[in-house]
Image (cartoon, rainbow, N blue to C red):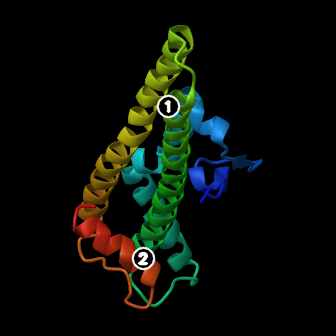
């Protein structure tokens, strides 16, 4: 089963952009570690600036409230709900990319192992394939490490979020938000 190629826009990056663009993540994106790391860096900007984003979001909801456009909930509750939704969307997109790339490099690694088993017994050819296999294994480990990095980034963001939104809990009617909330609460 081949992984589905995620098409993701720069709006998900949460960086102000006047010209949003769609980033098509392909196997070549996964195999180019610099590009992959840059993409992850862009997608982690929201998490890196969560305190500032919470401040701005709260100010925006306060301004809306002053104009009579506020909701039924408190300004803080509205801001927290909005930020939670942004965080979840961003986490979901990053997870999609990481899991896609994990699948791509795992498949590539398996193909190289199979090639090594099927190739002739010519030592030069075997060394060449083993060298490629080693490089692929290093890449695979780095991509798999992104899962751990992602967990650390999420936990840090969640701590910052909870420090400002102590009483927030996503509504029971929002299954997706609840799933991520429960997952975050359990440390996964």
Mark 2, residues whose alpha carbon is within 10 Å: few (<14), some, or many (≥20)?
many
**Residue name at image x 77 percent, y 47 percent:** 19
> Quick one: label 1 or label 2, which is nearer the N terminus?
1
State whether residue 59 appears in this view.
Answer: no
Residue 155 screen position, x and y as percent: 28, 54
Q: Quadrant of the C terminus?
A: bottom left
Q: Is residue 167 above or below residue 17?
A: below
Position in image of residue 126 (x %, y %): 51, 17
Q: Quadrant of the N terminus?
A: bottom right
Residue, x 39% and y 42% (percent of image)? 144
Query: Which structural element holds mark 1?
Result: helix
Q: Residue 169: x percent and y percent?
A: 31, 79
Instruction: Return the residue at label 1.
Output: 117
Q: Is residue 120 above or below residue 118?
A: above
> Mark on residue 99?
none
Residue drawn at the location 41% of the way across and 33% of the way down? 142
Position of 144 relative to 7 (above/below): above
List the single residue furthest toward the front: 121
* Residue situated furthest right in the rendering: 19
State the residue in front, 140 or 154. Answer: 140
For mark 1, does the 10 Å Cα neighbourhood hold few (<14), some (14 to 19), or many (20 or more) residues? few
Residue 171 image offset from top left, x and y in percent: 38, 86
**Which structural element holds mark 2?**
helix
| Front-lying residue, 39 or 134 | 134
- Does residue 132 show up? yes
Residue 185 falls left or right of residue 180: left
Residue annotated with mark 2: 177
Describe residue 51's horizontal placement relative to residue 62 as left or right. left
Residue depth check, mark 1 versus mark 2: number of the one nearer the observer: 1
């Amino acid at each position: 089963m081949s992984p589905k190629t995620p098409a993701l826009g720069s709006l998900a990056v949460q960086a102000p952009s006047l010209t949003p663009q769609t980033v098509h993540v392909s196997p070549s994106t996964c195999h180019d570690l610099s590009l992959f790391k840059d993409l992850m860096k862009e997608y982690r900007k929201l998490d890196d600036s969560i305190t500032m984003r919470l401040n701005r979001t709260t100010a925006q909801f306060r301004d809306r409230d002053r104009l009579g456009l506020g909701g039924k909930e408190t300004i803080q509750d509205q801001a927290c709900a909005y930020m939670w939704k942004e965080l979840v969307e961003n986490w979901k997109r990053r997870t999609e990319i990481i899991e896609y790339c994990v699948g791509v490099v795992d498949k590539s690694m398996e193909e190289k192992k199979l090639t090594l088993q099927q190739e002739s017994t010519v030592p030069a050819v075997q060394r060449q394939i083993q060298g490629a296999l080693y490089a692929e294994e290093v890449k695979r480990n780095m991509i798999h490490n992104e899962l751990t990095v992602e967990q650390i980034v999420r936990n840090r963001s969640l701590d910052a979020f909870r420090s400002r939104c102590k009483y927030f809990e996503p509504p029971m009617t929002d299954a997706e938000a609840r799933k991520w909330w429960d997952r975050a609460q359990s440390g996964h």
